[in-house]
Amino acid sequence: MKKTFLLFCLFLFCVSTNVFAQDATYRLSTHILDISRGVPAQNVQVDLFKNQAQSNEWQLLKSEKTDKNGRIANFVPTDGNENGVYKLRFHTTPYFQSQNLKSVYPYIEVVFEISGSAHYHIPITVSANGYSTYRGN
C-alpha cells in the first residue's frame, strides 16, 4: 500500500511539474554535444531554413544561439503550417576557433522533413573532424 501511494505521489509530482510534457508551442528543438570534450557546445549560432516547394529556395526563418546546455528549444512555432522540408545550419567554425582548433567543416547543415504533429528534436554530436546526427526526443 505504501509503495502504491509513493508511486502515485511521484506520478502526480511529475505531471504537475511537466516532467512528461514537451513544450507544446514549438515543434522543433536541437542540441549540440562536443564529443571531443564531453560537454555541450555553448553559444553556437544555428540558422533555421524552410524549403519553399514552388521555387525550391531556402528561406531563413530564424537564427538562435545554443544555451549553456548546448540547446535551442524554440524553433518552429506550432501554428498549423509546420509541415515541410527544413535545414539547420550549425556555425561551428567560431566555436572551434575559440578552442584554437581548425575544423574541416566550416559549418554543418542537416536537412530533414517535418510531417504530422509530433515534436522533432534534431541534435548533433561534433568534434573538429567529424559529426553525427539523429532524430531524438
Image: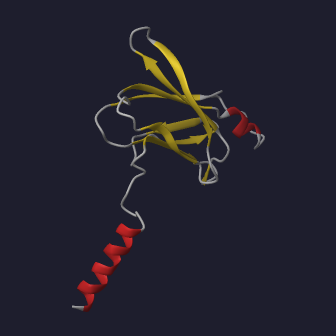
Q: Quadrant of residue 116?
A: top left
The reply, left or right, for residue 82 in relation to residue 70 is: left
Is residue 11 positioned above or below 25 on the image? below
Is residue 47 positioned above or below 137 on the image? above
Q: Closest to the observer: 100 or 59?
A: 59
Q: Closest to the observer: 103 or 134?
A: 134
Residue plotted at (39% across, 53% down): 22
Q: Is residue 30 visible?
A: yes
The reply, left or right, for residue 71 in relation to residue 80 is: right
The reply, left or right, for residue 120 in relation to residue 6 is: right
Residue plotted at (43% across, 51% down): 23
Where's the N terminus, which quadrant? Answer: bottom left
Is residue 126 positioned above or below 59 on the image? below
Residue sticking out furthest to the top: 55
Snapshot colouring: secondary structure
Residue sticking out furthest to the front: 79
Residue 123, image x, y percentages: 48, 42
Q: Is residue 123 visible?
A: no
Residue plotted at (57% across, 31% down): 62
Q: Quadrant of residue 66?
A: top right
Q: Closest to the observer: 131 or 47?
A: 47
